Amino acid sequence: MDSQGQDKSSSQGATARAAGEAAPGIERHDVKAVNKAEHRELYKKREPIFPKRVYGTFRNAKWAIMAITLGIYYLLPWVRWDRGPGVPDQAVLVDFGAPRFYFFFIEIWPQEIYYITGLLVMAAIGLFLITSLFGRVWCGYACPQTVWTDLFVWVERLIQGDRNARIKLAKAPWTADKIRKIGITHSIWIVISIATGGAWVFYFSDAPTLMGDLLSGSASTSAYLFIGILTFTTYSLGGLMREQVCIYMCPWPRIQAAMIDNDALAVTYDTYRGEPRGPHKKGATWDDRGHCISCRQCVVACPMGIDIRDGLQLECTQCALCIDACDSIMTKLDLPKGLIAYDTDINIAKKAKGEEVKFRFFRARTAFYSAILIFIGGLMVFGLSSRDFLELNVLRDRIPNFVTLSDGSVRNGYTVKIVNMGPDQGDYHLTLEGIEGATFRITGDPVDHTVLPTFEVGGDTVRSIRIYVSLPANHLPDEAQTPVTFVVDNMENGIQKTARSVFVTGENH
Ligand code: SF4
Ligand code: SF4
């Protein structure tokens, strides 16, 4: 059969298989097997990874970072911060009811959301800077996925034993002992997941009160819902999916490639020193061979299940556990540590040539990221330190635009909001500029005033005032709309804010 004939036959086979029929020359009972084989090519089954416990500098650093980050996450909602009476005393609180964001001594109002935007931009640029200097250290040490997976693996190891014991258990038939060990592991994972979801909702409500409500079953449905969602995601992402989240779901490994150059630090196997690799007998010479003894300790320690000796890979989170694993082997062999180490591509190439190596901290991209960080950080600090805690908002009535009264005067209605963002009550004097001869009537006050009164506004409060402004017939301007400005003065400290609007006396044509 010629090639054309083969194509045709293949095409017929595909069509027949799609229709659930046997292709010419293939028995019906073979069809399922063919389909299954094609299916296998498309989807690779996950191979479970059982990382071996390692000891060393980077493992200790990871323990320390895990303790700090998890400690902050779980405990922060319980830290109190006295802001005075009538204001929440939770140090960090996102209060949707108020609405406010409290962060220790900083209180952000909704109209100051740009501070949150600034913080997020700074966090992103900071991550870019760290990545361009030290590679994927965020992934390796501080990313929540890494931290919780590390915690879950620690629990697994505690209950089921180290790598070999876990592999043996996974392959073993389902005995009472296996059910007990797997059951305890998953139970602890679920408890951690519930605590994680619980801690999250405490950031949005007074933690001690919410804890009481949750335990008594009287908390809001949304609180239980969010705890449920976060319990599920923590358990599935940290316990079941683990490295697959980093490899297949997270976009960061793809994005960070744009920030890494030959000067960025990365966990690197020193090929020039390690190769040619191979088993080494005690006492044998190291001449004409590399220092890698093919013990695979770096591979079995890797939580991503990869071999760093194959070069920099997308899967590598730069957790550096392979460095600890290899360093302990080098120590046993009485060889210098650092066969696997944080290094830059440039330095590795220089080492091979016997040239002096150095780490270049200042490069164009690091200078650029640093400059942006300093600029935005400076703006944020300046903005926060020069806040005057006063806002004025004015909303003019649109329906109707204006009202002509029986004496010929024209009236406009406004809703004026004086926002006292400070902790203390204050007196605020309001004036209107732009028109002459106006009288003012405040909702709830039957008297017309020729000047606007002073308003008392409580600390951390928005006072909303309905004001009707009337202009007598002999003061009406020629234009249909006259620009006006509301001015509010804090009587204690003289801080002034303005808000523009218009006084409407006729329809625009
Ligand atoms: S741990 Fe070190 S010596 Fe052992 S295989 Fe890995 S690189 Fe080679
Ligand atoms: S190769 Fe090394 S640094 Fe990369 S993920 Fe594996 S253990 Fe961590």
Image (tube, grey):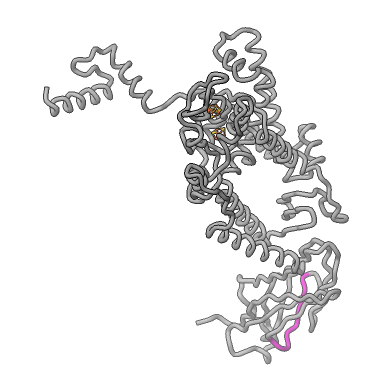
- Residue 73's x, y, as percent? 72, 41
In this view, 455 is above or below 82: below
Q: Residue at x 61, y 71 (%)?
A: 398
Q: Quadrant of ligand 1?
A: top right
- Number of numbered markers: 0
Quarter of the figure that contains the N terminus: top left
Note whether residue 224 is visible: no
Between 474 and 82, which is closer to the camera in this rendering? 82
- Residue 403's x, y, as percent? 64, 78
Q: Residue at x 54, y 35 (%)?
A: 245
Q: Is residue 456 magenta?
A: no
Q: Is residue 438 magenta?
A: yes
Between 403 and 222, which is closer to the camera in this rendering? 222
Outermost residue, left side: 2
Quarter-of-image position of residue 469: bottom right
Note whether residue 358 is visible: yes
Between 371 and 211, which is closer to the camera in this rendering? 371
Outermost residue, right side: 85
Quarter-of-image position of residue 389: bottom right
- Residue 289's x, y, as percent? 48, 28
Between 229 and 153, which is closer to the camera in this rendering? 153
In this view, 386 is above or below 139: below
The residue segment tinted magenta is 435-443
Outermost residue, bottom side: 474
- Residue 162's x, y, as percent? 64, 20
From the viewer's perspective, tell me whether residue 426 is left or right of residue 11.
Answer: right
In this view, 405 is above or below 343: below
Q: Residue at x 57, y 57 (%)?
A: 366
